[in-house]
C-alpha cells in the first residue's frame, strides 16, 4: 500500500518517492508493533480457508507486511504482491530475501485501476488480501468484480481497513489543554468509516465475517519502536492540521514533536497504541 492525503482529510496513497520512503517506514513499524494482531487475523483466515491456500494475491502490498505475515501463517503458500510503487516492491524483495522466503513471494508493479492482464497470469488464487487499500481505487465495485474473477470457487478475500491513525497520548499530555490528540483526530479524520459489505455482496461474494479488532497496547507490549511510530504518525497528522487547529494546539503539538523539549514524544514512557482495524472476510461461492 502506498499513500496520499486527499483534500477531504483522509490519509491515503502518496506516490512521490520521498513519501513512499516515509510511508514504507511507517507501515513496517506498524507491522512490528501490531504483530500480535496480524497473527490473530491470519490465524482466523487459516480456520476459515479450509485447505490451506497455495496461491495468495496481495493487492496494494506496500512493503509487504501482509505478504510476510501470510507466508508465516501458510508455509506452503506462494504470494503475488502487487503495488504501483517500485520502491515498495523493492523493500518487499529485500525483506523477503532477509527472511529466506524470496522464492515464495513474487512482485508485480501494476495499477489496479487498469486491466489485470499480468495479475491473471498467477491465478486463480485461493486467497486475496487487501489491507487499507481498496478505498483508494477509482472504482471499488469494479475492483471487487475483478477480484471475484481471480478467485477459485470457495476462495476467500480479506479486506481490512483501519479506523484512522492510532492514538498514543494520555488525555493530558503535559503540554497545552487536555484532549489535544482527540482534537487533532477530529480535525484530520473527516471521512465516514469504510463499509464494504454491500460492495462485496454486489460482486457475488458471500460475507462470512465482519470483524473489528480493537488494539490496545501499552509501552511494554508495543516494544521499543513505539516512540518512533508515534512520532511519525503524529508528525504526519500535524502536517495536515495547520489550517484546522488553533494556534495553541499547534504550538503544543510542535512542542511534543520537538525532541529537545521535556515532554517530547521521542522520550516519553507513557505512550500506548489504541486503534481499531476492521476486516471483512468473504467467499466466492
Image: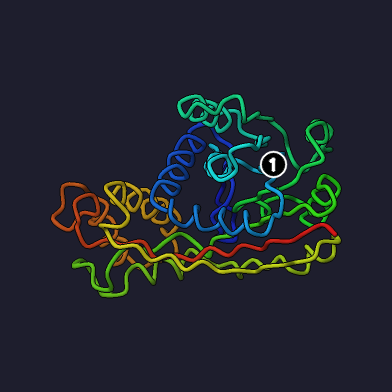
Q: How crowded is mark 1: few (under 14 residues within 10 Å), some or many (20 or more)?
A: many
User: Is residue 231 left or right of 83 when viewed as pictured?
Assistant: left
Q: How many labels were placed on the picture?
A: 1
Q: Colour mode?
A: rainbow
Closest to the observer, 238 or 117 = 117
177 up-or-down from 269: above or below? below
Q: Residue furthest left?
A: 262
Residue 76 spot, x, y in % from top left: 63, 36
Which quadrant is the N terminus positioned in? top right
Examine the rendering and report whether any part of residue 83 can be seen: no
Residue 105 spot, x, y in % from top left: 62, 31
Residue at x 82% of width, y 37% of height: 116
Residue holding disc 1:
56
Residue 225 spot, x, y in % from top left: 31, 46
Q: Which residue lies furthest to the front in this view?
A: 51
Examine the rendering and report whether any part of residue 5 can be seen: yes
Closest to the observer, 85 or 74 = 74
54 up-or-down from 226: above or below? above
User: Is residue 180 left or right of 266 when viewed as pictured?
Assistant: right
Residue 159 spot, x, y in % from top left: 66, 57
User: Is residue 284 left or right of 165 when viewed as pictured?
Assistant: right
**Splitting the image into 4 quarters, where does residue 118 fall?**
top right
Closest to the observer, 111 or 272 = 272
**Splitting the image into 4 quarters, where does residue 85 fall?**
top right
**Splitting the image into 4 quarters, where does residue 150 fall?**
top right
Tag 1 secondary structure: strand
Residue at x 57% of width, y 51% of height: 12
170 up-or-down from 112: above or below? below
Closest to the observer, 95 or 89 = 95
Residue at x 55% of width, y 38% of height: 64
Residue at x 85% of width, y 59% of height: 285
Amino acid at each position: 500500500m502506498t499513500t496520499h492525503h486527499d483534500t477531504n482529510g483522509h490519509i491515503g496513497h502518496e506516490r512521490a518517492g520521498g513519501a513512499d520512503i516515509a510511508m514504507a517506514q511507517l507501515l513496517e513499524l506498524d507491522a512490528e508493533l501490531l504483530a500480535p494482531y496480524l497473527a490473530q487475523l491470519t490465524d482466523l483466515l487459516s480456520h476459515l480457508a479450509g485447505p490451506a491456500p497455495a496461491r495468495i494475491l496481495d493487492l496494494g502490498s506496500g512493503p509487504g507486511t501482509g505478504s510476510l505475515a501470510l507466508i508465516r501463517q501458510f508455509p506452503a503458500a506462494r504470494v503475488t504482491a502487487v503495488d504501483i510503487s517500485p520502491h515498495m516492491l523493492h523493500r518487499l524483495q529485500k525483506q523477503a530475501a532477509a527472511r529466506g522466503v524470496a522464492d515464495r513471494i513474487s512482485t508485480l508493479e501494476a495499477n489496479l485501476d487498469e486491466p489485470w492482464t499480468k495479475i491473471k497470469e498467477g491465478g486463480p488464487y485461493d486467497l486475496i488480501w487487501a489491507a487499507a487499500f481498496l478505498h483508494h481505487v477509482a472504482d471499488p465495485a469494479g475492483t471487487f468484480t475483478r477480484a471475484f474473477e481471480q478467485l477459485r470457487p470457495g476462495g476467500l478475500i480479506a479486506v481490512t481497513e483501519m479506523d484512522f491513525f492510532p492514538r498514543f497520548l494520555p488525555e493530558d499530555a503535559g503540554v497545552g489543554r487536555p484532549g489535544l490528540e482527540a482534537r487533532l483526530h477530529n480535525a484530520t479524520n473527516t471521512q465516514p468509516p469504510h463499509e464494504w459489505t454491500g460492495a462485496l455482496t454486489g460482486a457475488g461474494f458471500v460475507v462470512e465475517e465482519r470483524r473489528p479488532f480493537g488494539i490496545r497496547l501499552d509501552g511494554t507490549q508495543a516494544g521499543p519502536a513505539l516512540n518512533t511510530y508515534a512520532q511519525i504518525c503524529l508528525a504526519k497528522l500535524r502536517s495536515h492540521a495547520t489550517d484546522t487547529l488553533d494556534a495553541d494546539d499547534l504550538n503544543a503539538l510542535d512542542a511534543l514533536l520537538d525532541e529537545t523539549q521535556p515532554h517530547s514524544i521521542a522520550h516519553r514512557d507513557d505512550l500506548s497504541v489504541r486503534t481499531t482495524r476492521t476486516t471483512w472476510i468473504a467467499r466466492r461461492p
